[in-house]
Image (cartoon, helix red, strand yellow):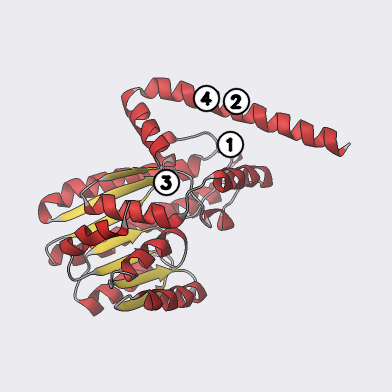
């Protein structure tokens, strides 16, 4: 997709006021960079003051008309509301929001500590809830806006060994659909973005066994997709009015498969997982034999 196509986003929101949670790295920062090149005002919310300072400097160099930053934990409702209100009040409103803050975990359900559920849901799901609760009033007061909540293909694939992550992302999809129904007639569009694996720093804070992390890193590194083109496609398709953005193409096939033939999809996923585990065991045996 060509960056010039973002003219549509500029026309929809000429005031160019954007707020991004998880904005100092990964998909959030990549989105901010696209907007900065088009002279948007960009607000970044992130947990790291150091990353925020670096990101803000980068965005100013790219051409952002103004950069607003706030250190906040999206799992803390009061903290994220203060951060979002600060940027929106400063600009007299808010046009676009991307809720991209997120973490990951891996491991089978009975092996996953209860604390991991609370930690992950607090950020991935309730963090999005808190962000939307802070963003929506500004958009409604201004007569409209666009919220993009970053879910994941995991939210509909529901693959084995990732139950907390899957549940949190399925929740984000459902929340986005609900809010879009509630506020569409008031001019607010809410889109769920559901990307598959692409190269990002999501695994840096992931909670998982070393073996599970190694597998996830291999899958992520095998992807030839970087954050920047993912951010561009999400921006453009949301600007066009899409309420569900699934990418890349192979994940759109899975999305349709799951919706049309859910039972067949479940059988397919079990076979897929079994085959993947057999391949892993075979590779492990080869390494052990070679090491001997």
Mark 2, residues whose alpha carbon is within 10 Å: few (<14), some, or many (≥20)?
Answer: few
- Residue at numbered disc 2: 275
Which quadrant would residue 219 be assigned to in this image?
A: top right
Dots 1, 2 in contact, CB < 8 A: no
Mark 4, residues whose alpha carbon is within 10 Å: few (<14), some, or many (≥20)?
Answer: few
- In percent of the image, x 14 and y 66: which residue is there? 141
Under circle 4, the secondary element is helix
Mark 1, residues whose alpha carbon is within 10 Å: few (<14), some, or many (≥20)?
Answer: few
Q: In this view, does 274 lie to the left or right of 47?
A: right
**Residue 148: image x %, image y %?**
30, 54
Q: How far apart are marks 1 and 3 (CA)?
A: 17 Å
Which quadrant would residue 40 be assigned to in this image?
A: bottom left
**Residue 42: image x %, image y %?**
32, 71
Mark 3, residues whose alpha carbon is within 10 Å: few (<14), some, or many (≥20)?
Answer: many
**57 versus 142 height, above or below:** below
- Residue at numbered disc 4: 270
- Residue at numbered disc 3: 168
């Amino acid at each position: 997709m060509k960056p010039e196509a973002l003219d549509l986003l500029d026309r929809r929101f000429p005031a160019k006021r954007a707020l991004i949670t998880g904005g100092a790295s990964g998909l959030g920062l990549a989105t901010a960079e696209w907007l900065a090149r088009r002279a948007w005002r960009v607000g970044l919310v992130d947990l790291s003051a150091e990353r925020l300072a670096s990101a803000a400097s980068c965005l100013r160099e790219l051409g952002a008309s103004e950069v607003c930053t706030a250190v906040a934990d999206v799992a803390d409702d009061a903290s994220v509301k203060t951060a979002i209100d600060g940027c929106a009040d400063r600009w007299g409103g808010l046009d676009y929001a991307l809720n991209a803050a997120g973490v990951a975990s891996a491991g089978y359900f009975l092996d996953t500590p209860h604390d991991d559920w609370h930690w992950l849901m607090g950020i991935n799901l309730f963090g999005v809830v808190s962000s939307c609760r802070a963003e929506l009033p500004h958009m409604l007061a201004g007569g409209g806006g666009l919220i993009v909540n970053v879910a994941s293909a995991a939210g509909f694939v529901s693959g084995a060994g990732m139950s907390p992550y899957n549940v949190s992302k399925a929740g984000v999809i459902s929340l986005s659909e609900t809010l879009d129904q509630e506020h569409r007639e008031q001019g607010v569009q809410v889109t769920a973005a559901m990307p598959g694996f692409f190269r990002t720093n999501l695994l840096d804070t992931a909670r998982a066994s070393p073996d599970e992390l190694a597998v996830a890193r291999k899958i992520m590194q095998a992807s030839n997709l970087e954050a920047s083109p993912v951010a561009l496609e999400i921006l453009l398709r949301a600007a066009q009015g899409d309420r569900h953005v699934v990418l890349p193409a192979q994940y759109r096939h899975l999305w349709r498969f799951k919706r049309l033939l859910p039972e067949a999809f479940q059988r397919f996923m079990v076979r897929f997982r079994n085959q993947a585990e057999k391949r892993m065991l075979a590779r492990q045996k080869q390494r052990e034999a070679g090491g001997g």
